[in-house]
Image (cartoon, grey):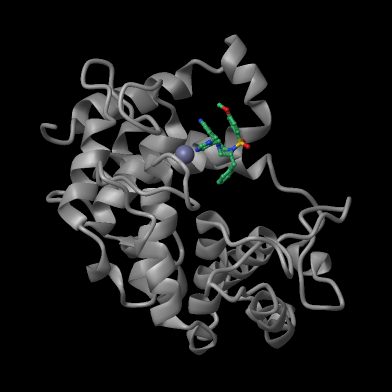
């Protein structure tokens, strides 16, 4: 497996950032703000944020802001739509609650109703889906448990039942999958592990085997991390791999907050003012 290739991953992220005009990047245009978040947060966890020109990043991010606001997307039943077209999903509840908490503006929405909607998406297996009655999925569980953690509502979660479902996601190789019978994938190291930490059940999986699985997904020559060993790397799995290793307390990495998916240092600065 070997060690985390810190310098190689920094080089890989900087190269992706520069390569804005090739085919792959044009196809991914709508993902560029997500890409900036994945790339910059990875650099921060690795302690290498000074590798980018911060003023340049800030002015580019500011260009992406629109007039419309998050609170306007909350519906009568407490759910959130993703945009003006109206699709409803607990992913949007998480994004709204996480962003407003970071801006200390949760008072702009009906938090009680938002929590009620998320709880209505809870299933008999202890997990959560994207809408009421929809199948449990680890990505959706992270969104719901994260939003409940941020709003201080984790008492709505059956921790033993959900912990059981989540720890069953670990397969022989040590990796985690998102649903029963699926292949393991590095990004589920984040969705599953962060949820287990938030409900105090992380000791129910083999942390060492998971760390080994993530390290096995590195491209040791060119940098970057893939979904599973020997696949093509991308910024998304590079971020969730490094973030997963941070949750596993891999040496030399900055700690990441399991609910906000941002470095603990960023969350405390933004929310507590230091
Ligand atoms: C990937 N998106 O819909 S996407 C994403 N997936 O925009 C970004 N694990 O084909 C990258 N799968 C790579 N760079 C994959 C973001 C998806 C997640 C797909 C994926 C990841 C397994 C199949 C949804 C936050 C934001 C968005 C998502 C999840 C969490 C794709 C396929 C889909 C997408 C982008 C590229 C390469 C990168
Ligand atoms: Zn993945």
Question: Which corner quadrant of the image does residue 238 belong to?
Answer: top left
Can you say which quadrant of the picture contains the N terminus?
top left
Q: Position of residue 186 (x, y in %)?
A: 37, 41
Q: Position of residue 169 (x, y in %)?
A: 39, 55
> Relative to 28, is 191 above or below?
below
Q: Is residue 92 something one can see in this rendering?
A: yes
| Residue drawn at 56 percent across, 57 percent down | 137
Q: Is residue 269 something one can see in this rendering?
A: no
Left or right of residue 260, residue 83 in this image: right
| Residue drawn at 28 percent across, 29 percent down | 9
Viewer-proximal residue, 7 or 189?
Answer: 189
Viewer-proximal residue, 230 or 246?
Answer: 230
> Relative to 177, is 113 above or below?
below
Can you say which quadrant of the picture contains the C terminus?
bottom left
| Residue drawn at 36 percent across, 50 percent down | 189
Q: Residue furthest front?
A: 181
Viewer-proximal residue, 190 or 51?
Answer: 190
Left or right of residue 133, residue 265 in this image: left
Question: Which corner quadrant of the image does residue 68 belong to?
Answer: bottom right
| Residue drawn at 10 percent across, 32 percent down | 2
Q: Position of residue 81 (x, y in %)?
A: 79, 60
Marks counted in the figure total 0
Q: Position of residue 178 (x, y in %)?
A: 48, 50
Left or right of residue 127, residue 228 in this image: left
> Relative to 227, is 72 above or below?
below
């Amino acid at each position: 497996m070997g060690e985390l290739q810190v310098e190689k991953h920094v080089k890989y992220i900087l190269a992706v950032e520069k390569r804005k005009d090739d085919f792959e990047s044009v196809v991914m245009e709508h993902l560029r703000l997500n890409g900036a978040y994945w790339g910059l947060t990875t650099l921060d966890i690795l302690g290498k944020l000074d590798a980018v020109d911060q003023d340049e990043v800030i002015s580019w991010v500011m260009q992406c802001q629109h007039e419309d606001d998050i609170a306007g997307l909350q519906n009568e039943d407490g759910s959130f739509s993703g945009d003006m077209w109206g699709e409803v999903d607990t992913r949007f509840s998480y994004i709204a609650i996480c962003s407003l908490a970071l801006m200390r503006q949760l008072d702009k929405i009906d938090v009680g109703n938002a929590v009620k909607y998320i709880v209505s998406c809870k299933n008999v297996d202890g997990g959560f889906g994207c809408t009421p009655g929809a199948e449990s999925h680890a990505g959706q569980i992270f969104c719901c448990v994260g939003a409940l953690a941020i709003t201080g509502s984790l008492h709505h979660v059956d921790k033993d039942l959900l912990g059981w479902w989540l720890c069953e996601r670990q397969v022989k190789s040590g990796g985690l999958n998102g649903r029963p019978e699926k292949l393991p994938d590095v990004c589920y190291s984040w969705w599953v592990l962060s949820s287990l930490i938030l409900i105090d059940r992380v000791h129910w999986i083999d942390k060492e085997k998971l760390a080994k699985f993530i390290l096995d997904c590195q491209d040791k020559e060119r940098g970057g991390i893939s979904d599973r060993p020997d696949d093509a790397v991308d910024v998304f799995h590079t971020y969730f791999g490094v973030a997963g290793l941070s949750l596993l307390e891999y040496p030399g990495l900055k700690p990441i907050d399991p609910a906000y998916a941002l470095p603990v240092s960023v969350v405390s600065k933004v929310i507590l003012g230091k």
